[in-house]
Image (cartoon, rainbow, N blue to C red):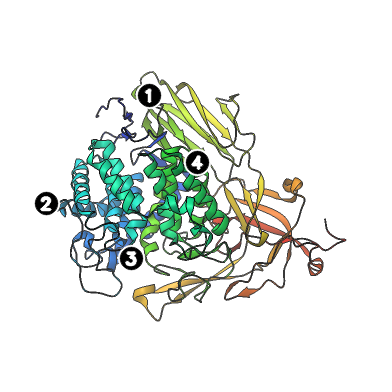
Amino acid sequence: MKTFLLISMLTLSLLSKTNAQPCINNRAPLKIKPNMELPLGSIKPLGWLKQMLISQKNGATGQLDKLYPLVMGPRNGWLGGDGDQWERGPYWIDGLLPLAYILDDDALKAKVQPWIEWAINSQRADGYFGPSKDYSPEKGIQRNNSQDWWPKIVMLKILQQYYSATADDRIIKLMDRYFKYQLKTLPEKPLGHWSFWAEYRSADNLQAVYWLYNITGEQYLLTLGELIHKQGYDFTDMFLNRDDLSRINTIHGVNLAQGIKEPIIYYQKHPDKKYIDAVKKGLADIKKFNGQPQGMYGADEALHGKNPTQGSELCSAVELMFSLEKMLEITGDLQFADHLERIAFNALPTQISDDFMVRQYFQQPNQVKISRNLHNFDINHGETDLVFGFLAGYPCCTSNMHQGWPKFTQNLWYATQDMGIAALVYSPSEVKTKVADGIEIRIIEETNYPFDEKIRFTIHVDNESKIGKFPFHLKIPSWTKSASIFINGQSWNDLLESNSIVVINRTWKSGDVVELTMPMHVETSIWYENAMAVEHGPLVYALKIEELWTKKEVTDDRFRYGDDFYEVNAGSPWNFGIIDFDKEKTQEAFSVIRKKSTPEYPWNLKEAPVEIRVKGKQIPSWTLYNNMAGPQPYSRMIYGMKSYNEQTETELILIPYGCTTLRISEFPVITLYPPLAR
């Protein structure tokens, strides 16, 4: 096993395998990070999360080369072929590779390896690597712009992950030569030379440059970093000084999801608080002007406001998750951890089928009918943007959706600057690593979170004495009150504040158990037209609507939209509002009902582990418009509306947003007409 000294760059020799890359903190002059990503493969999913990754393995992620041979087959330019030369192949491998190493699956690794080998062997003497020849147009594939910077940025992320898992030194040599090529070539052919995508997504290029600098210490990489920052889109100025986020159609939603981290990536070299402030203001303005309860925003494809029938793209969800993961690692700011969980536990499960074979291009917070019809979106791909299909909408999401759950798993745990271990994002999992004094540890996290508020950590110290001292960091989320920690059944009495990191620094022995309880309470928030969203811990809740699925054939353009797709119609009424209540009595207005156990796969209508019940009434005037929920009824109308009094009060059943396909998650609030008002 390699040994790394603790020098100014705070390199930690925290190896889970002898062939894995160590956890490496920033090298001066980059600002020290509070957290460091563990070697790929150190963290294993358990429980429902493991089932999600197995579904990917058995679904599209594990067999995209067979399901989508036109793009992912041997003709792909990233395998040396004359087919697709651009982003889709690298997109797939960016999710397949971490899945393969997290599951330690030899068959999946074998699918990844040819892409790695071809990328390495493609490098020219001048440092360029990747496809370099453009071909004439061919239906269904992208054969031009082979030298565009953007697809190689995706491949850089892949190579970083491969090195993290294998410590293959060829990766360092390739990236060193390529970055020297970039430094020489970018002044003549800047990031926007072939297309604008690399300008908006320059953060992924910049983070790879800093990553290599931390390994090699080559000063030219800092110069290259400045050049990439200068040529990239100026998100800092956008967030701090312009009103772009308050207007529609100002930026592509996926570019925003990827670019939002650029100020914080750059902050590592220039630790000016304005870069943190820029991102914080950007996130606040996104929520204010375009926000949706599940953690996403209306952008179908460009920014399109916060009406709950506007769409949010699947690529935006997985890319925003990755941005939040990187920003959490760099800053330790728990806002990013909570936001990451909000997307992972709400937006991500609902947009991909249980078998991980089909997906939606766009999802809607108020989604009551899924059909092949024209909707009020910024773009229209043959009216397929809302249906579930293999290629529905645009095929970028077919290729890019695979990174969401594997990278989420990879970022559940971090090594810490104080030579400890941190659990900053929660899900059932197991981590193996080294901590202070080279002590090997294993921690098992048993939980039904996010459906349950209890987490049990069992610590194993793998040295001869079975004893070791190290700090254990735990997140206390912003939404909980009166969290508690018990160690081996005894209360740990330190004050546990919401939105904080608790550090338990003690001598541990094998078998020690830490039990964290984070009480969940029903909270409500206000959205479009004063609508109400219902939240319980990290989960958003939505109206339970019966689903009628119908499979239909594509008859007009199978190259573009695939062979078939699914429409989903409502089998029960959806047009309900929640009766207004005294905010001081929120907990009395809602009742929370938990199932005795969490199913192996909880993310669907049948298996939803938790229900919330609340009083409501149907709103007959709220009907379909343009094959989706009609204009949102205004909530908390002064004096109320007399016609509401005539409707029968009913008990509404809400389930986690991520368990729904059809839903209302932004509820009209019904104010009853006096004198019946409550």
Badge 4: residue crowd in 10 Å (few <14, some 14–19, many ≥20):
many
| Residue that lies at the very extreme toward the bottom in this rendered image | 556
Q: Which secondary structure, mark 1? A: helix
Q: Quadrant of residue 441?
A: top left
Q: Which secondary structure, mark 2? A: loop
Residue of label 1: 436
Q: Which secondary structure, mark 3? A: helix
**Quarter holding the N terminus?**
top left
Residue of label 3: 67
Badge 1: residue crowd in 10 Å (few <14, some 14–19, many ≥20):
some
Q: CA distance from mark 4 to mark 3?
A: 33 Å
Which one is earlier in the sequence, the residue at label 1 or at label 2?
Answer: 2
Name the amino acid type tagged 1.
Ala
| Residue that lies at the very extreme toward the top in this rendered image | 465
Name the amino acid type tagged 3.
Leu
Q: Residue at x 70, y 59 (%)?
A: 652
Name the amino acid type tagged 4.
Tyr
Q: Which dot, 2 or 4, sits closer to the camera? A: 2
Which one is earlier in the sequence, the residue at label 2 or at label 3?
Answer: 3
Residue 426: give its label.
Answer: 4
Q: CA distance from mark 1 to mark 3?
A: 46 Å
Which one is earlier in the sequence, the residue at label 2 or at label 4?
Answer: 2
Which one is earlier in the sequence, the residue at label 1 or at label 3?
Answer: 3
